[in-house]
Image (cartoon, grey):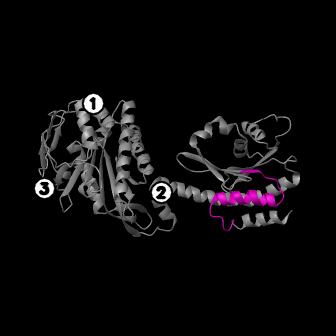
Amino acid sequence: MSSSADSLFDWLLDGAPGATQSIHVVERLGVDLNAAGVPVDHTGVFVTTLHPTVFGRRFRWRKGDPKVTTYELTAAIQASPAYTESPVYQVTAHRATIHQRLDGPPPAKDYAVFHEMRAEGYTDYFAEPLVFTNDETHAVTFATRSPEGFTAEHIAIIKRIGRPLARLAEIFALRRVASNLLDTYVGRHCGDRILSGRITKGDIETLRAIIWFSDLRGFTAMSARSTPREIVDTLNELFECQVPAIERHGGEVLKFIGDGMLAIFPLEKDDIAKRCKDALDAADEAFTALDERNEKSKTAMQFGLALHVGDVAYGNIGGASRLDFTAIGPAVNVAARLEGLTGKLGQSIVLSSDLAAHAGMMLEDLGEFDLKGVPDKQGLRARARAFSSSLKTRNRKAQPQRKESIDAASGPGTSLASEWRAPPKMTSFDFGMSSFRRLIPVPMSSPLSWSPHKRSVGCVIFGATG
C-alpha cells in the first residue's frame, strides 16, 4: 500500500480537515487515488437526502476537470427507469458491489450508463455501497480509461478508503438534512441563523424589510363546506402560487398562519427601490400563477395582498424548550391590518404610503385609514394588476358590490363610504386607458381622470405663454 493511499485513509479517518463541503472530499478522492497509483478518471458519489422535492445528490469528479459537478435529483427520478435500471440502484437497494470491464464482451446486465461510458473511452467500472450507521445505503463509483483497467491492488485500495469515506459522507449528509429541514420549515435565512447558533430565547435582531402579508378570501365559508383534505389541498395550491415567486425574487417566507402568509424582503442600505420592485414582481408572478390555477380548477379562489415597509424584530420567540424563529413588530401588525382592507376596497394588491413612495410607478391614492391598534392613520395606495390577469378574473366573476362603510378591522375611526355597481366587462377602451395609466407617469393628482363605469376621460392641458 502506497504512502499516498495511507495519507488519504488517515485524512478521511480524521474527518477530512480543511474540507468544508462535500465537493472538497470528492475532489480529494480523485486526486489522491491517482497519486496512489489508482488510475481513476471518474469518481461519483450518490447520497439520498430528506427533502420534500429532492431525492438525492450526486457528485461527479472527472480527471482534468477543475470542478466537481453537483446534481440534485428530484423525487420523480426515484421511480424512473433512469434510476431503477442503473448500477447505482443495485448498489443502494441490494448493497451489491459491481466491477465490470467495459471494453470486453457486453455483460448479461448491460446498463445504459455502461453504453455511455464506453462511448467516452472508459474501460473499467467499479461501484460499492456506502453503509451509514443508521443502516441506510448510498453509493460510490469509479471508472478508468486505462487499458489495464482496475487491478486487484487498485480495488483493494478503493475498498480500504471506503470505510472512513462512509463515516464522513454520513456526517456531511446529516448536516445537509438538518439544513434542508430548517430551510423547509423555517426558511433559508432563518435556518442559517439557527445552525450558526442563534437558538437562545429572546435572541433577536432588528432589521428593515418590505413585509408581505396575504390572506385567502372566503376561507371561513370554504372551510364550512369542505373536507379537511380539500382544505389542505386548497391551501397548498394557494401557497404554491406565492412561495416560488417570493423566493425567486429574494424574499423569505416566514410563516403560514392558517390561510394567511407572512414573508419579508430584507433591505440593505440604499436598495429599497430595487427591493420594492422585487416584491411587486413577485406579486405579479403570484397572481399570474393564481389565474392559471383558476383557469384549470372548477372552483376559483382569490387572495388579498398588502405590502408595507418598516422595522421588524427578527429572531427567537417562545418558551424555554419550544421556540419559533419569526418576525414581529408594529410594521407587521400594520401589514396585516392593511391586508384586511383589500376585500372591502375591491383590490387584490395594496401598498402602504410609506412603501408606495419608493415604487417608481403611478398608484391610486385610496385615502387614509384608522387601523385597529395602530395609533396613526395609514395612507393606502392601489396598484392595478396586469391586464391579462385582471381581465380573466373580472370577466369570469363580475360580482355586484354593495354600498357599505369601510373601516379597517372594524375599529373606530374614519370610514370611507362608497357605492359600487356591478363591474362591467372590460372593453378595448378600458384596456387602452388602463394601459395608458400604467405606462405614462402622470401623477394621480393631475387633471386626468378616467372611470371604467362612466367610459369617459377628462383631460386639461396647461400651456405656457411667453
Tell me which residue sits at (45%, 65%) in the image. Answer: 321
**Dots 3, 2 in contact, CB < 8 A:** no
Please tell me which of labels 3 and 2 falls first in the chain.
Answer: 2
Amino acid beneath label 3:
Gly
> Which residue carries the number 1 mark?
395
Q: Nearer the viewer, residue 349 or 94?
A: 349
Q: How many numbered callouts? A: 3
The disc placed on residue 106 is none
Kindly indicate the quadrant of the structure image that contains residue 384.
top left
Q: Nearer the viewer, residue 66 or 54?
A: 66
The answer to if 174 sits in the magenta stretch is: no
Amino acid beneath label 1:
Asn
> Which residue carries the number 3 mark?
413
Q: Is residue 442 above or below residue 202?
A: above
Tell me which residue sits at (27%, 46%) in the image. Answer: 383
Q: From which residue to which does the magenta span run?
A: 16-43
